[in-house]
Image: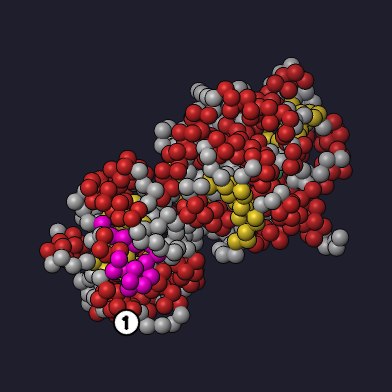
Amino acid sequence: MKFKKSPDSKGHFGVYGGRFVPETLMPALIELEKAYKAHKEDRAFLHELIQLQKDYIGRPTPLYHAKNLSEKLGGAKIYLKREDLCHTGAHKINNAIGQALLAKKMGKRRLIAETGAGQHGVATATGAALTGLECEIYMGSEDVRRQALNVFRMRLLGAKVTEVDIGSRTLKDAINEALRDWTTNVHTTHYVLGTVFGPHPFPVMVRDFQSVIGKEARRQILNAEKKLPDCLIACVGGGSNSIGLFYAFLDDDVRMVGVEAGGRGIGSGEHAARFAGGSLGVFQGCKSYLLQNDEGNVLGTHSVSAGLDYASVGPEHCFLRDMKRVEYTFATDEEAMKAFALLSETEGIIPALESAHAVAEASKIAPSMSGDSVIIVNLSGRGDKDVQEVARIKGITL
Amino acid sequence: MNRIEKIFKTKRAQNSKIFIPYIMSGDPSLEHTKRYVAELEEAGADIIELGVPFSDPLADGPTIQRASERALAQGVTLRKCLELVREIRQTSQVPLILMTYFNPVFKYGIAAFIKEASDAGVDGVIVPDLIPDEADEFIRAARQRGLDTIFLLAPTSTEDRIGKVVKAATGFIYYVSITGITGSKLSIGEPMKDMLALIKNSTRKPVAVGFGISTPEEAAAAAKMADGIIIGSAIVRLIAEGKDIKDFAKKIKEAI
Ligand SMILES: Cc1ncc(COP(=O)(O)O)c(C=O)c1O
């Protein structure tokens, strides 16, 4: 069975995906779909993108054999795909640069984006600075508090940061506000959605821009180990870093695990584990798994990591789960915090709290695997942005 | 012929325009909503649009977002909105439209929702985040029950989109008068006139204009170009401020 596939012409992955948006946005989505289709075949565009990936983002990112961590856990050899070494500190830039370039070609003069952890906001602000476009970032006021450092970074990059003070004041509310802005300014503005979510063509376009991660990792592991890995692990917020790593391996015999935010535990209701605790719904542009109540209102979510704190998940992940191609599990706040410390102390690498969820899963499964088996963990981002929040949680004043 | 079709036909014959006020169900309580419906009907509303609160109303501006939050805080659900319609129907035959985001309907079950809405006495449904391309099941169920599926067009709509929407819409076509969300600043001018002409050229179905109309003057200007007008945020704002809506509705009615 082939799992690498594109959605149907209306953006459906099986029953998931599609377009559930106000009619006002439909022409813009169709225009974007056409422009993306044309540019992804365009040699000049691809050349420019590849050049920027290399010289600006710093690709290829290393695939690092984490010997100390592997030894400490005992069992499988653990490799880290070092997206934390990307310019601006996370994989988000892979997508943001791609979309900024596309928007520029489309003649848009303004970029907007939502952000949770602030990484996608910083990446979009960076893309805007690079391409000379105006930029406005929407961010829930709860996240503004948690990610103060990234808010200041966005402002340094020349972006306007607008706090969203309604609803749960986190990522989903920022997306609502960005969609409202886009609905209003659609003639001049491109909405740089930050993950494999929302209305078609975003899930497939963002996946394509992120799939460079897995393409590199596949080549790198074949070089280093002369074989394919046994298992891939990545955290799943909307699902872009995970699909970015997984995509190149989908038709290989490789196990894949996506790790959602277990927050304070599934029983507590305070989590963002859509597959463990959600049901089919329609939210912010697509059909997918959703944390919702019986009336179809969207539930508040919780995670120690702002980037995983979201009520729904990319439609292609739902499809891959149904096909039993990818397994989905979760790590709790506590497990992520432990993994955060573990990686920092054993390898001298401070991971983003999002990525720490993937490290947590690796530390659960590696010990039971043989010494010649290989795991690749996607280290989607670095932890600099989280240092203040971790200190706060530990009750330390900096 | 259902109530919506009938009222448009009657008014068209009289050469007069349709007035459609919007209020949020359960803001500030369902009892209030019942009373507002009665007042609006007395003031001359031809059709009344009842909002269903939703946690993430992405097509709405701050005024209706806050109304939605207040209604949710009262525990208002889609089910309770249907009960509300059932109660209103005991005393009134005013045409009623529900405006709800898609997820509550999806969660309820599309067929179950359509059946119960129609049994309760709803005449038409507007789902701002459901486009005809994704609405096959919804349209099929609604046709069976004679419930109108009112779809939207916007200043951004291309001829291709206009074709799709006028085909799928029944009752009337909702023309969103601004590129934006509810309650934004309106500008009535040539572009709007041109778009409405373009739509009118492709269908004989009635067209009502809404989003951003807030004064009798604007209502009058917009009504000249269409079969009817819809006013939401301006009324919801009066309700939020605890002010009378009947006088305002009367003034709008007179102006058009
Ligand atoms: C470092 C990092 N990892 C992961 C994520 C989660 O997003 P996704 O699932 O789209 O990769 C975020 C989102 O902000 C992030 O900043």
Work out whether residue B195 or residue B92 is closer to the camera in this orientation and state it: B195
Q: Is residue A261 magenta?
A: no
Label 1: state its secondary structure.
Answer: helix
Q: Is residue B142 visible?
A: no
Name above or below for residue B162 compared with residue B220.
above
Work out whether residue A394 or residue A111 is closer to the camera in this orientation and state it: A111
Work out whether residue B85 or residue A88 is closer to the camera in this orientation and state it: A88
Residue A245 x/y as whole percent: 65, 32
Residue B161 x/y as whole percent: 33, 43
Single out the residue that lies furthest toward the top: A226
Image quadrant holding the C terminus of chain A, namely bottom right
User: Ligand 1, what quadrant?
Assistant: top right
- Say if disc 1 is inside 8 Å of ligand 1: no
Q: Disc 1 designates what residue?
A: B247
Question: Residue type at mark 1?
Answer: Asp
- Could you tell me which residue is drawn at 72 percent across and 19 percent down? A222
Viewed as shown, does residue B186 lie left or right of B47? right
Work out whether residue A228 or residue B133 is closer to the camera in this orientation and state it: B133
Single out the residue that lies furthest toward the front: B190
Name above or below for residue B16 compared with residue A232.
below
Residue range (magenta)? B207-221
Name above or below for residue A10 compared with residue A330.
above
Q: Residue A244 lies in what quarter of the image?
A: top right
